[in-house]
Image (cartoon, grey):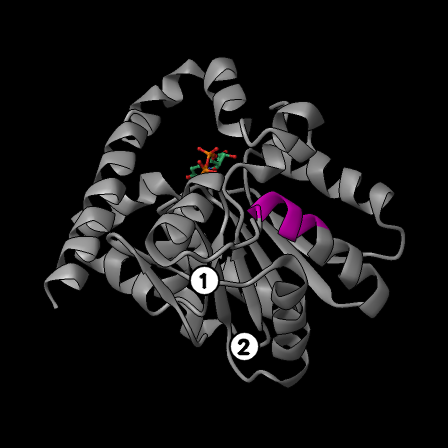
């Protein structure tokens, strides 16, 4: 991706939903290897750089989508750019809609067994014609990983959804991508299957429209405070980076 933006310690690609979908169509139809799509949010700005392997995985990822409002605001503060949000959950939904039309073969890997099975059923109902060529829950033993990869390849999977949570899904991709023969797009979707299967409720539309989905999630799952407590620090770092850039501009 060109024009990748550095947001404090991480990067993001300034793409909107339509551009992301065109990228996916182009990659599925013309690509020769698996391309990764991962979501970027303020929490990852702190967790990713702590792990050199993960940092490298993000740095070399093919598409880093501006998943949350925090990253959109950061791009505006740092670069004056108005990015559009590309929430991973919405991108997955649109990929499913697109794939039902184009007959792309999908594989859904991750989540608990019941959640994975239910999510596949829901997607088949929501998107008539969708080709879900295979599925597997996210608790496959390492000893059985070769079998899973054989299954993904035998299904001629073109788009693989990885629902293992972050950073497990990103590391899985890095470790196994070279053995994925037919996969062209691999999107890390975290806990999205839990919402599709109805195990976790997504924020009502009103909350989404007010960009407070993160707050709704925090209220419904208070244990997420551990991850979200870094948000005020992210805001402070952003202000400090902006002040430094103004200072160095004035000194010139
Ligand atoms: N999960 C999995 N295998 C694992 C660990 C987690 O499939 O070994 C699944 C888990 O069932 C849940 C998802 O990964 O559906 C993690 O959801 P979370 O909301 O924590 O992920 P995030 O979107 O925050 O990355």
Cα separation, mark 1 vs mark 2, equals 13 Å
Q: Is residue 60 visible?
A: yes
Residue carrying label 2: 181
Q: Viewer-proximal residue, 252 or 189?
A: 252
Q: Secondary structure at mark 1?
A: helix
Q: Quadrant of residue 126?
A: top right
The 10 Å Cα crowd at callout 2, few under 14, some 14 to 19, many 20 or more, is some
User: Where are the magenta residues, as a range?
Assistant: 87-93
- Mark 1 or mark 2: name the one nearer the start of the chain: 1
The 10 Å Cα crowd at callout 1, few under 14, some 14 to 19, many 20 or more, is few
Q: Viewer-proximal residue, 115 or 10?
A: 10
Q: Viewer-proximal residue, 205 or 139?
A: 205
Percent x, y of residue 90: 65, 46
Above or below for 206 versus 86: above
Q: Viewer-proximal residue, 136 or 15?
A: 15
Residue carrying label 1: 146
Cβ of mark 2 under 8 Å from ligand 1: the answer is: no
Percent x, y of residue 79: 37, 58
Locate the N terminus by quadrant: bottom left
Residue 198 is one of the magenta-drawn residues: no
- Residue lying furthest right: 128
**Left-right relation of 195 to 178:** right
């Amino acid at each position: 991706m060109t024009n990748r933006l550095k947001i404090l310690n991480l990067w993001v690609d300034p793409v909107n939903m339509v551009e992301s979908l065109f990228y996916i169509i182009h990659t599925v139809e013309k690509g020769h290897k698996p391309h990764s799509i991962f979501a970027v949010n303020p929490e990852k700005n702190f967790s990713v750089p702590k792990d050199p392997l993960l940092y490298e995985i993000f740095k070399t990822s093919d598409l880093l989508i501006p998943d949350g409002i925090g990253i959109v605001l950061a791009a505006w503060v740092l670069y004056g750019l108005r990015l559009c949000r590309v929430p991973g959950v919405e991108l997955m939904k649109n990929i499913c809609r697109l794939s039902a039309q184009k007959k792309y073969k999908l594989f859904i890997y991750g989540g608990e067994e019941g959640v994975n099975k239910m999510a596949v059923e829901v997607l088949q109902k929501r998107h008539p014609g969708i080709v879900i060529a295979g599925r597997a829950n996210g608790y496959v033993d390492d000893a059985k990983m070769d079998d899973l990869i054989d299954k993904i390849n035998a299904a001629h999977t073109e788009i693989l959804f990885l629902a293992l949570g972050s950073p497990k899904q990103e590391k899985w991709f890095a470790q196994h991508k070279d053995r994925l023969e037919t996969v062209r797009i691999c999107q890390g979707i975290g806990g999205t299957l839990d919402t599709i299967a109805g195990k976790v409720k997504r924020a009502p539309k009103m909350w989404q429209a007010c960009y407070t989905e993160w707050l709704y999630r925090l209220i419904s799952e208070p244990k997420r405070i551990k991850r979200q407590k870094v948000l005020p620090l992210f805001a402070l770092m952003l202000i400090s980076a902006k002040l430094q850039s103004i200072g160095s501009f004035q000194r010139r």
